[in-house]
Image: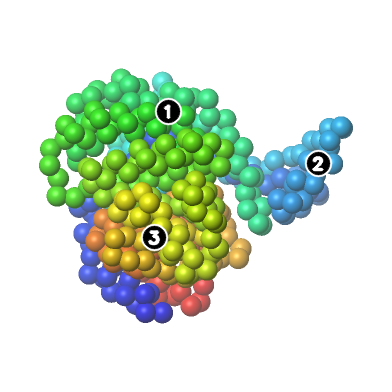
Amino acid sequence: MEYREKTLHELGLKASEISSKSALVGFDGFVDKIVNPVDQRHGKGDDFTPISTIAEFGGRISAASGKSANIEMYQRMEKLGGNGPIMAHALLSGGSKVRYIGALGKPAIHPVFKEFAEETDAVSITGPGITTAAEFKDGKIMLGDMQSLDEVTYDSMVEAMGEGALFDAFSRADLIAMVNWTMLPNMSNLFIDLIERVFPNLGPRDHRNFFFDLADPAKRSEGDIASVLNIIKRFQNFGSVTLGLNFSEAQQIYSVLGHEKADSTPDELKRMAMTIRQDLDIATVVVHPTTSAACANRDGAWWVEGPYCEHPKITTGAGDHFNAGFATGQLLGLSPEACLTTAVCVSGSYVRTAKSPSLSDVSHFLRGWDSK
């Protein structure tokens, strides 16, 4: 494919520049417990047959109506989670300098974030949420405990680091990624505080990228979604705004904006990205199903095929790795096609290895694409 060769060429020219780029990411934080629901246990430890699909899991729960059920959740791993930390970790692996502000533990950093916090000079403003991610062959069900995230506010950030240090952190960033609006009830007000209290007071900068990921807003009302979209577009006054959407999220946003749902064909994905971008009047919109990705900016729209993995080692965090790959491409000034290709390769490498890839890993992945 021509876009793969083009991406390899552009990465060869520009990848070394990533070490000079800095990102500020926030503001959530979760401890992720990755589990498999047990269908039949045969022995101790991992000697069991898992419930393989969401439908089977749903059937097991439905069958307990009027009775009761005991479903074992076998924990495969415990790791740092949350859209922000996972995206930040992927940006770090890609070579960017990263600063993190978010919910990593209070009064002390949770042990699962210890190394990450040191690498990102992190500021923690509250305790993390807890996500139990039940993974199946056809998707995942995430169960969350997130009461502590009510404390993610502008005032709590100022309390944790001081307003001067907060201004300085934002002023130094080439990329500011603000993700997981859905799970942070005070995020819209935080956005407004940043727009009205921080960015008007920062010095001039040649270029500043904003990246937003609403993170599955299905549980929020259409009014809330429409409101935050109007807030996000105001950031365009202070930099270049990108809104990243998986296919489900894109359909939700498309509907809120008054359009009929589109399908996942290349032309429809490009049309959906173009329409959302035009309606919001922001720089870039990205739409990424599991098998491909599209984006649109003021110059046009592009689509690339993704390296779909039928048997991934991990799926939790795949979208955050996609976002990090796309944002890394933007930091390097890659073409839109190359940003998309870098994004699908970062995500594709991650789901196969359960590790965040470097840009060298991405180039290696691209060269071996046809064998994936």
Callout 1–callout 2 Cβ contact below 8 Å: no
Instruction: Indicate left or right for 36 with 256 as reference.
Output: right
Instruction: Indicate left or right for 209 with 323 as reference.
Output: left
Sort mark 2 into few (<14), some (14-19) or many (20+) by Cα contacts within 10 Å: few
Q: Residue furthest front?
A: 258
Foreground: 369 or 361?
369
Q: Position of residue 67 (x, y in %)?
A: 87, 32
Sort mark 1 into few (<14), some (14-19) or many (20+) by Cα contacts within 10 Å: some
Residue at 22% x, 42% y is 238
For marks 3 and 1, the one nearer the N-term is 1
Residue at 25% x, 30% y is 196
Q: Amino acid at mark 1?
A: Asn
Instruction: Indicate left or right for 128 with 37 as reference.
Output: left
Sort mark 3 into few (<14), some (14-19) or many (20+) by Cα contacts within 10 Å: many
Residue at 27% x, 45% y is 236
Please say if 8 is above or below 58.
below
State the residue position of label 1: 186
Q: Could you tell me how far apart the alpha carbons at marks 3 and 1 are, in whole angstroms?
A: 29 Å
Callout 2–callout 3 Cβ contact below 8 Å: no
Foreground: 2 or 295?
295
Q: Could you tell me how far apart the alpha carbons at marks 2 and 3 are, in whole angstroms?
A: 41 Å
State the residue position of label 3: 274
Q: Position of residue 45 (x, y in %)?
A: 71, 45
Q: Could you tell me how far apart the alpha carbons at marks 1 and 2 are, in whole angstroms?
A: 34 Å
In this view, the mark in front (2 or 3): 3
Q: Amino acid at mark 2?
A: Ser
Q: Amino acid at mark 3?
A: Met
Please say if 372 is above or below 95.
below
Q: Is residue 17 visible?
A: yes
State the residue position of label 2: 62
SS of the residue at dot 2? helix
Q: Position of residue 131 (x, y in %)?
A: 56, 37
